[in-house]
Image (cartoon, rainbow, N blue to C red):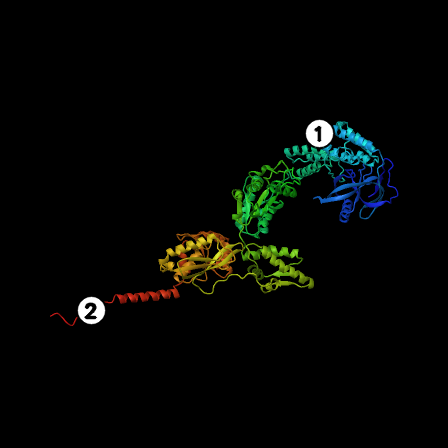
Amino acid sequence: MPTKIIPARAALPVTAATPAETLPFLPLRLSVLFPGTFTTVTFSLPHDLSVLQSCISAGREVVASHCPISRTDPDVLHLHEVAVTARIHASVKMPDGSVAVMLEGCRRVAIERVIEDKANLQVSFHYLSDSASDNRLKLAAGEAVLEAVRELSAVNSAYSVEYLAALKSITDEPDRLVYQAVELIHVPLDEKQKILEITDVESRLDCLRSSLDACRLPRRNRASDSPVAHPGRAFAVDSTSRFSEDGEAGRIKELIAASPHLPPEVVARGTIEADRLGHLSSASAEYGATQIYLDWLLSLPWGKITPDNYDITEAEKILSSEYYGPENLKEQILQRLSVRKLQGSGGDNPTLCLIGAPGTGKASLARAIAHALGKELIRISVGGITDVAEIKGTPRTFISALPGRIMRSLREAGTCDPVVLIEEIDYFNLDNNASVNMALLEAIDARRNARFLDNYLGVPFDLSKVFFICSVRSFEEIPEQFLHRFEIIELPGYIEKEKVAISKRYLIPNLLASHGLTPQELTFSDQALARIISNYTQEAGLLAFSQMIGKIFRKIALEKLKRPDASWTIGESAVEAYLGPPLYIPERAESLPEIGTAAGLAWTGAGGELMFIEGLKMKGSGQIITTGSLGEVMKESIQAAHSYVRSKADMLGVDFSDFNDFDIHIHFPSGAIPKDGPSAGITVCLVIASVMSERPIRNDIAMTGEITLRGRVLPVAGIKEKISAAYRAGIYHVALPKENQKDIKELPKEIVRKTKLTFIERVDELFEVCLLDFTPSSYTLEKVFAAEIAKAKRKTDRRPVKRRVSQYKKK
């Protein structure tokens, strides 16, 4: 950039016989730095940032000179001959890429020439010394300056008595007094530069006193006002903006007038803040804070909406093509979209809440909804939030205040009616602070959010047009305050057949594109995908499954670089070569019926699972022993099952005294895995009946259901996943509660055709179906032998005794 040095107004006393020195140069466009004072300046131009980076890393000083912007020659850098050397004490990178640094003025210098380096500008300079003067005259001039400051504070409320007290402490140092006083008052930049150039301290004080006298005049009588530091502040925003203070305020007012969508409250607040900005110095902290506030206020999408002109038939096609899931779930979404289409984007409908294990498609469904509506999807994670300010913003009186996450996301979206997915509600507000929950509910509840008030903005924003969707892992983890305002949609876990279909339709094509491969170079067989699902993943969703496939893709990518023309087909036998030994061994059906072993069905975070329950009786005192890391619900089910079987001892052919003479041990394998829930009641009941009656349980049937003390079988959840687990394990006969008959329609037709389903209402029916013929055990034989011995003894005791007749009869 071309440069031009503005000469000083008078001759300069350069230090004699000293060679010129060289330092990097920084331009100060909206401030003048004095020796012994501090100021904070923000730089944004590339060459200025380059100078800062090199000086900060090397710990070097810089030369800082006031560089006024020329209206006639704006492309030339005009710098004053008299400048100061400065130290860089701190630097902070701002969000917009600029860097704010704190500069300390050191010594006055006279710039000799500018050296244009490839990386940055440098200047050669000589140090300046003050001319000698009478110390008494300097002290008298200092007292006159203090008197002028005292009079100024009396007539102008902007100058408090604290300024006068600060200056009184340095009355005996006239040099510092000048520089500190000129930093505390409204002095035009050209006057500041003039004071910096004066070499005589007494003349410098006289010039400052004249400036103080000018400050006491009314504003309208002053010739000009300069963008200098606000009293008591040392902050300047140094940029190349073409607007002055009044020009910036005028520009903001023009933006307000040119925005027809702004509500009246926003127009009023923006106008007030713009007027305030016009009366602030650009070097003050309040100026920067007000400007940032106005930027936020005017950049929000007030009233900017995307028309709801979607076609419901097209929306149905988009949902079907982009989300693989139950038809009834898609129907529920289409019903909500139809209502939105008929009544508009407002309304007080409950907020959608998607419940499902990780990887079950919550984000994919939200993305499909946004696509169907023709709107942008914004994802907000609220996990770990424990402060209301994260939701509703920080008041402007706080340092680094910002709006809350809701308003920040709308600014990114650019419209006030996007689809917003609020994720990780289950990790939200772990401290259980009710005010934090209510702050989020205020934002997403359609009954309240038409006038959502962010603490930073201070004016209400209409959130009623936003399509809010929340996601959570399970129903139990939804905060209590949200339950009555959520419309629950449960996303079931995927079974093996569905995972294979999803991988072929979505996962593999996406992974091919992201790994630089083509469908002709790499293919998977259905058997290979099924092997990955069963032996390398244990989940209801698709996250681990996708990661395992991606692992194979990365190994293929490495092989492709070595063999560019090769192609690969991954079969079942090749899976172990790429993924290593199996991580999980699925449960399989027992080969023979056994006493005290039954196949139960459970739902876990990994989906449906076959869970064998084992039982054993032994001599004891009638206790129930349980092992297997069981929860309270499952322990209560075991107690209820034991009581019911005891009440049916006669029907099972069990001696009632056996329940007092034998202990029963119920064990759930895989003891390291916590287990709880109401699905194992009938299985435990069958195991207890088996061990007490010595009758084996069929090995080709699995079951699920809960019982009551009266023997009723209660319905359970997760029927689709449980029956699929039995199908994978090779068990094609399942006993279910009769009330779960309605859930069979969710099953794939292939499983329904091959699986026999027995619906039961009472536990007695389960006994008839699952218990085989009586099988004597050592305990039973011992009882039989004991009974026979006792019987024989009783017969012996009842045998008649023959009396001997005396030989001698009475004659």
Tell me the number on the disc at residue 803.
2
Tell me the number on the disc at residue 434.
none
**In this rendering, would 126 be left or right of 769?**
right
- Residue 319: x and y in percent read 58, 49
Does 200 sit above or below residue 470? Answer: above
Q: Nearer the viewer, residue 90 or 407?
A: 90
Q: The C terminus appears in which quarter of the rendering?
A: bottom left
Q: The N terminus appears in which quarter of the rendering?
A: top right
- Cβ–Cβ under 8 Å for marks 1 and 2: no
Does 288 sit above or below residue 535? Answer: above
**In this rendering, would 645 be left or right of 450?**
left
Label 1 – label 2 distance at C-alpha: 139 Å
Q: Nearer the viewer, residue 59 or 271?
A: 59
Residue 694: name its quadrant: bottom left
Q: Residue furthest bottom?
A: 807
**In this rendering, would 220 be left or right of 402?**
right
Q: Nearer the viewer, residue 274 or 284?
A: 284
Identify the amino acid type marked 2.
Arg
- Residue 570: x and y in percent read 61, 62
Q: Residue furthest right?
A: 17
Looking at the rendered structure, the secondary structure element under dot 1 is: loop
Looking at the rendered structure, the secondary structure element under dot 2 is: loop
Does 610 sit above or below residue 480? Answer: below
Mark 1 vs mark 2: which is more N-terminal? 1
- Whether residue 317 is visible here, answered yes or no, is no
- Residue 243: x and y in percent read 75, 36
Tell me the number on the disc at residue 157.
1
Identify the amino acid type marked 1.
Ser
- Residue 520: x and y in percent read 65, 60
Counting the numbered discs, the total is 2
